[in-house]
Image (cartoon, grey):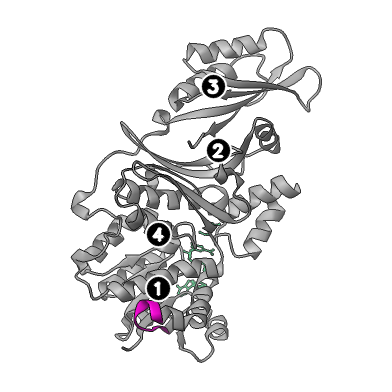
Amino acid sequence: MNAIKVGLLGIGTVGSGTFNVLNRNQAEIRGRAGRGIEIAMVADLDTARAKSIVGNACEVVSDARQVIANPEIDIVVELIGGYGVAKTLVLEAIAAGKHVVTANKALLAVHGTEIFAAAHAKGVIVAFEAAVAGGIPIIKALREGLTANRIEWIAGIINGTTNFILSEMRGKGLDFATVLKEAQRLGYAEADPTFDIEGVDAAHKATIMSAIAFGIPVQFDKAHVEGITQLQAADIKYAEQLGYRIKLLGLTRRRENGIELRVHPTLIPTNRLIANVEGAMNAVVVQGDAVGTTLYYGKGAGSEPTASAVIADLVDITRLHTADPEHRVPHLAFRPDAMSDTPILAMDEVLTSFYLRLRVADEAGVLSRITTILAENDISIDAVLQRESAEGEKQTDLIILTHETVEGRMNKALALMQGLPTVLAPIVRLRKEELA
Ligand SMILES: NC(=O)C1=CN([C@@H]2O[C@H](COP(=O)(O)OP(=O)(O)OC[C@H]3O[C@@H](n4cnc5c(N)ncnc54)[C@H](O)[C@@H]3O)[C@@H](O)[C@H]2O)C=CC1
Ligand SMILES: N[C@@H](CC=O)C(=O)O
């Protein structure tokens, strides 16, 4: 049988990895897919760089629409990124009856509903394994491997750049800016690295996993998003002393009244496997009612790890494209008529435990006033640590770990504590998850 023909839009980090791995492993891939998979045309604005990658193996153009218009192309792979031109091109490819593979989590987390509806109407596949956790087959696991389960929660280190930064800062004592530059050099960071460091990229991925796990539409606008730029070295140190490691965690959890969807720096007990995931590695923990806890670990970014996921999608489409669309795995695991309208909870309603650091005057009665406020708000204390402050003898750092409480209640207590004259600086508040 003739090879299936692929058109690549964008041949940067992931695109070049896809080209190279497809070429290198073509015999094996053909054996698995049942026919060859050939990149027949590449579009990239930088045609000179694109030609230096593909040589004479295929045609290179600067206009992506030429690829979409080519009747020989069966599958369009979008590896440009962003919400702008990528959205237009993906919708045009669908309208032209092409199957689409994309690694673009930003696009799917924000415009997924429109894109999946268009694909469903046209009977084509939009595959996106590479959009979450790079090379880890987490989409396949959630949509297929765990299909028997009622998913209870998912927690993941799903941004390689921030995990790399946190690891290098903690392990080598390097500063934030130096490590970020290295992450960019290694091809981990997004074109706009603020997406990584402000938690947006992780929230895109958490949004997609939440939709698949709970059968809800993608709702990035309802996600709570906090990055690592406000994180202070002192808190990383105190967390370690208390037996916790701080990770940027993407978390989505089913509650009785709705679904939590949040990304923020999180204290995790050091004895959990996920707390020991270092460098650009990703890990996702999925809790299902039947299977219990499962853990998926691997490279979440980089040229060939991400290409591995892109090619897995190409193989899936090669096998499935002649199947009746009704017999394919639905884009978001649930069939469109079985989607749920369970709401995403506001942050005030989220249930979590907390790490608080208060810079206080070192005098009698300070601790008791603080614990009284917590008690009056029904917040139970798990541990308290007092450490000499760097600011001198008359001040001290109080570190408090709480048991689980509703975030709105903690916000009320925080406002009262911040108003005490003996609290001398803005209170640091981080969230803590036991993940058990
Ligand atoms: N780099 C990584 O480790 C990972 C990236 N992704 C996603 O994969 C996608 C691609 O990322 P990278 O390869 O890192 O980006 P990149 O910036 O390295 O490559 C993008 C390529 O698209 C080309 N391009 C830009 N506008 C174009 C247009 N209008 N027409 C044709 N070509 C155009 C650029 O010249 C560049 O070669 C993004 O959505 C990203 O979020 C997903 C997982 C991991
Ligand atoms: N910028 C992302 C790349 C993969 O999605 C990351 O750092 O994880």
Which residue appears at 65% of the width and 18% of the height?
A: 423
247 above or below 307?
A: above
Q: Is residue 33 magenta?
A: yes
User: Which residue is at the far bottom?
Assistant: 56
Numbered label attached to residue 291: none
Check disc 3 and give the amino acid type. Leu
Residue that badge 3 annotates = 414
User: Residue at image x 46%, y 82%?
Assistant: 26
Q: Amino acid at mark 2?
A: Thr
Q: Which residue is mark 1?
A: 77
Foreground label between 3 and 1:
1
In this rendering, does residue 174 appear at all? no
Which segment is the magenta one? 31-40
Indicate yes or no whether the magenta region holds residue 89. Answer: no
Residue count near mark 2 (Cα–Cα under 10 Å), binned few <14, some 14–19, many ≥20: many
Q: Amino acid at mark 1?
A: Val
Q: Secondary structure at mark 2?
A: strand
Cα separation between marks 2 and 4: 26 Å
Q: Are marks 3 and 4 in contact (CB under 8 Å)?
A: no
The image shows residue 230, relative to residue 378, as above or below, that is: below
**Residue pointed to by mark 4:** 107
Residue labelled 2 has its Cβ within 8 Å of some atom of ligand 2: no
Q: Please provide percent x and percent y for residue 117.
A: 24, 60
Query: Residue at the spot x=55%, y=47% of the render?
Result: 198
Please name the amino acid that badge 4 sits on.
Leu
Alpha carbons under labels 4 and 1: distance apart: 14 Å
Ligand 1 closer than 8 Å to label 1 CB: no
Circles 2 and 3: CB atoms closer than 8 Å: no
Q: Secondary structure at mark 4?
A: helix
